[in-house]
Image: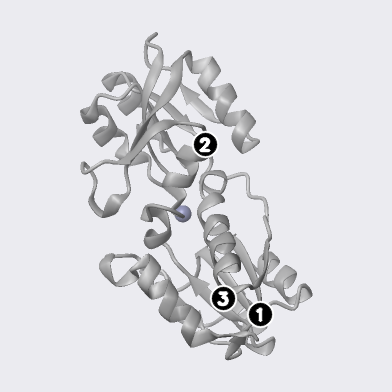
Amino acid sequence: MPLERHKLMQYLNDYLKPQTFSDYTCNGLQVEGKAHIQTLVTGVTASQALIDAAIEQQADAILVHHGYFWKNEPDALVGMKHRRIKALIQNDINLLAYHLPLDAHAEVGNNVQLGHKLGLQAIEVSSAAKQALLWTGKTAQPLTTTEFAALIERKLDRAPLTIVAGDKAIETVAWCTGGAQDYIDLAAELGVDAFISGEASERTYHSAIEQGVHYFGAGHHATERYGVQALGAHLQKKFNLNWLHIDIDNPI
Ligand SMILES: [Zn+2]
């Protein structure tokens, strides 16, 4: 029996609690498709390539971390935005998107999942940032910056941008996935040895050096691949869906 879409939406609403976040986009059902869902495709970003792959898989729904309708983007459905939404509607595919709720969630969130992926210990959310977006943990043993960079490269399949801030070993780490480079200052206040985010800015270098926090830019896409997969696996088990994660690689 395919799952009724409204039951899935109700469950996600209870599980991810999107109404408790102040976000830059609307979380939940962004484009309505068929009323029943049997095949679910997950991906990081609702790009044309992901939509095309989902159509090929005859997906009933696509679930992503980066959907549409961001604050400050033009409202009109023209060009790239029109092509994407037209493809979804023509193929009757639901688009579900969860941004901050999927960064912050304690079980399937990008942050907790990244901590597990890197094998960090004593993983917990820090109260230093709002909306459960800064997380901390410890390495199993003290690591040099070279060793820690190699760990990230091994686990995420991508060499991080590394800024070495002094010669202290890494035992305590703070992180926030995605475009969260400016949390480095909160991480410095926490007194951790290293900070990881997805993206970096020019100023990130100076923040790292002047505050003595090693910095690792591990990729926006690469750090946010794991939450939506954990959620897909959770939904597959819960509702017996056909679930497939499609990774459209992105070097940024
Ligand atoms: Zn993101």
- Residue drawn at (23%, 29%), measured in percent from left and top? 190
> Judging from the image, what secondary structure is the residue with disc 1 in?
loop
Mark 2 nearby-residue class (10 Å; few <14, some 14–19, many ≥20): many
Alpha carbon of mark 2 to alpha carbon of mark 3: how far?
Answer: 28 Å
Going by the image, does 9 lie left or right of 37? left
Q: Nearer the viewer, residue 160 or 33?
A: 33
Residue 92 drawn at (x, y percent):
65, 88
Per the image, the residue denoted by label 2 is 218
Alpha carbon of mark 1 to alpha carbon of mark 3: how far?
Answer: 26 Å
Residue 7 drawn at (x, y percent):
48, 84
Residue 228 drawn at (x, y percent):
53, 58
Q: Nearer the viewer, mark 2 or mark 1?
A: 1
- Residue drawn at (41%, 54%), measured in percent from left and top? 103
Which comes before the other along the chain, label 2 or label 3? Answer: 3
Q: Nearer the viewer, mark 1 or mark 3?
A: 1
Specify the amino acid type for callout 1: Gln
Residue 105 is drawn in which quadrant? bottom left
Per the image, the residue denoted by label 3 is 81
Alpha carbon of mark 2 to alpha carbon of mark 1: how far?
Answer: 34 Å
- Residue drawn at (65%, 86%), measured in percent from left and top? 1
